[in-house]
Image (spheres, rainbow, N blue to C red):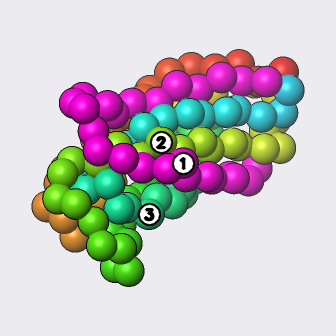
């Protein structure tokens, strides 16, 4: 199983924009989410951990050191695709983390999906 992660264009948050959804298909799970960040100039990456039928995707947000950025809460969309997933029912968890910021990790999703 492998994780493909792609970040969208971030912007200022208008409030409460944090969460994710997951849908299963044939040999894959698609996750779409939005991560609230300390400012809009954050780079996101994804990490996958599997324990049995539980798949945890950790979305890690780090400040972009090269960006000149306004100081407002940011909102950054992303997509994560798990490929080569064996058929079965899985618990999918998505956790947003913010190393070095003082922000607590946020649980964005926990749901069950069935892969065909």
- Residue 6 part of the magenta segment: yes
Q: Secondary structure at mark 2?
A: strand
- Residue 96 part of the magenta segment: no
Classed neighbour count for the residue bearing mark 3: other residues with Cα under 10 Å, few (<14), some (14–19), many (≥20): some
Marks 2 and 1 close (CB-CB < 8 Å): yes
Q: Is residue 78 visible?
A: yes
Classed neighbour count for the residue bearing mark 1: other residues with Cα under 10 Å, few (<14), some (14–19), many (≥20): some
Mark pair 1, 3: CA separation: 10 Å
| Residue 93 against residue 105 in the figure, above or below | above
Q: Which residues are magenta?
A: 1-25
Q: Position of residue 63 (x, y in %)?
A: 32, 69
Q: Could you tell which of marks 3 and 2 lies nearer the N-terminus?
A: 3
Q: Is residue 52 left or right of residue 60?
A: right
Q: Which residue is mark 1?
A: 8
Q: Position of residue 106 (x, y in %)?
A: 28, 41
| Residue 22 against residue 75 in the figure, above or below | above
């Amino acid at each position: 199983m492998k994780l493909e992660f792609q970040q969208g264009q971030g912007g200022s948050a208008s409030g409460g924009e944090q969460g994710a959804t997951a849908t299963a298909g044939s040999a894959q799970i698609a996750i779409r989410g939005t991560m609230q960040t300390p400012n809009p100039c954050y780079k996101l990456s994804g990490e996958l951990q599997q324990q049995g039928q539980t798949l945890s995707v950790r979305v890690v947000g780090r400040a972009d050191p090269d960006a000149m950025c306004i100081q407002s809460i940011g909102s950054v969309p992303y997509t994560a695709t798990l490929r080569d997933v064996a058929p079965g029912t899985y618990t999918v968890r998505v956790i947003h983390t913010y190393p070095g910021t003082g922000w607590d990790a946020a649980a964005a999703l926990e749901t069950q999906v069935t892969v065909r």
